[in-house]
Image: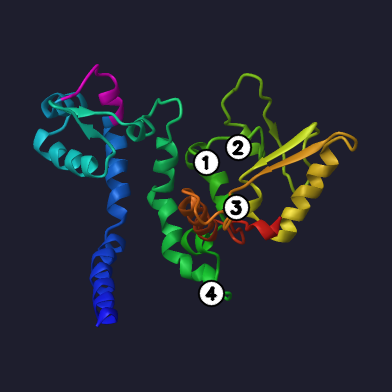
Amino acid sequence: MEGEISRKEEEAEAQVDVWKYVYEFVDTTVVKCAIELGIPDALETRDGPTILSDLSSSIGCSPSTLHHIMRFLLHHKIFKEGLIGYLQTPLSRLLMKNGEKSLPDFLLYANDPEMLAPWHSLSARVLANESPAFESAHGEDVWRYAAKNQAKRRLLGFNNFDLPHVVSVTPDCVGVVHVGGDMFVSVSKADVAYLKWVLHDWDDEECIEILRKCREAIPKDKGKVIIIEAVVEEDKNDKLEYVRLTLDMVMMAHTNRGLQMIELTF
């Protein structure tokens, strides 16, 4: 009897959970809408709570339509509600277009229709006899696509060592010298080679070649290669486990052979 109740509870929970997967894209698209409307930035300019009519006036939209958007975002705790209006949260400040630590460009990039297209070809990556997901969607790999689409590439930010077509449009940064090149050919001379979220884009043989070029670029006696990667299965209780697993899926959708590394890989 107890097992029967447990089974029914699991089935009831499943019937609720399945709707999260049916409409999970809605959360992101509504947040994307808020960024495009400039809602976080509009609220940041106010000293206190902002009422609906003032907010709608500042961004130039209908109060009745905006009410539906804000109600959804309040439910998901993107914003919070004061006694007489809407208030920012630490999360909403990360969505400001001009915030110090904000990520709106990255969110807009990840949810651009052209960047979402490979996700609909993810099964092609799983099937060994099919093309990588990105190539299935766009007819070329992500690197050739980026070379032809500078606006998309700029949304990702820049490294100080990158392909020449990337460096050519990289904004100046105090204390940083931007060098164009190809890490599979040679890496510019330096005391330290710093690789952040680079190796996960490539397979084992390509990673070995990248590291070999880094070793050639640094001093033999005191040179260092620093690798920053999100490691899957590092800690099952880590709050960022979801991010690690999601990055693994991103590699499958957007690269030819890249995968997020596990601890044993290192």
Q: Mark 4 or 2 closer to N-term?
A: 4
Residue at the disc numbered 2:
166
Mark before the other along the chain sequence, 3 or 1: 1
Give the Cα separation between the discs numbered 3 and 4: 24 Å
Q: In this view, does 257 lie to the left or right of 72?
A: right
Residue type (three-letter) at the residue carrying disc 3: Val
Q: Which residue is at the far top?
A: 47
Kindly indicate the quadrant of the structure image that contains residue 11.
Answer: bottom left
Where residue 169 sits, quadrant-wise, is top right
Tell me the kind of residue under disc 1.
Answer: Arg
Front residue of 126/78: it is: 78
Q: Residues within 10 Å of mark 4 (few under 14, many from 20)?
A: few
Of circles 3 and 1, the one toward us is: 3
Q: Which residue is drawn at 19% across and 41% down?
A: 69
Magenta-drawn stretch contains 248 = no
Residue stretch in magenta: 40-50
Name the residue nearer the viewer: 20 or 108.
20
Q: Looking at the image, do the residues carrying marks 1 and 4 touch, with CB atoms under 8 Å apart?
A: no
- Residue 231's tag is 3
Residue 139 lies, in percent from the top left, at 52, 61
Q: What element carries label 3?
A: loop
Helix or strand or loop: what does disc 2 sit on? helix
Which mark lies nearer to you, 2 or 3?
Answer: 3
Q: Is residue 14 shown above or below 43?
A: below
**Magenta stretch: residue 49 in it?**
yes
Residues tagged 3 and 1 counted as in contact (Cβ below 8 A): no
First along the sequence among labels 3 and 4: 4
Q: What element carries label 4?
A: loop
State the mark number for residue 25: none
Q: Residue 153 carries which label?
A: 1
Q: Identify the residue shown where x is 28% and y is 69%.
A: 14
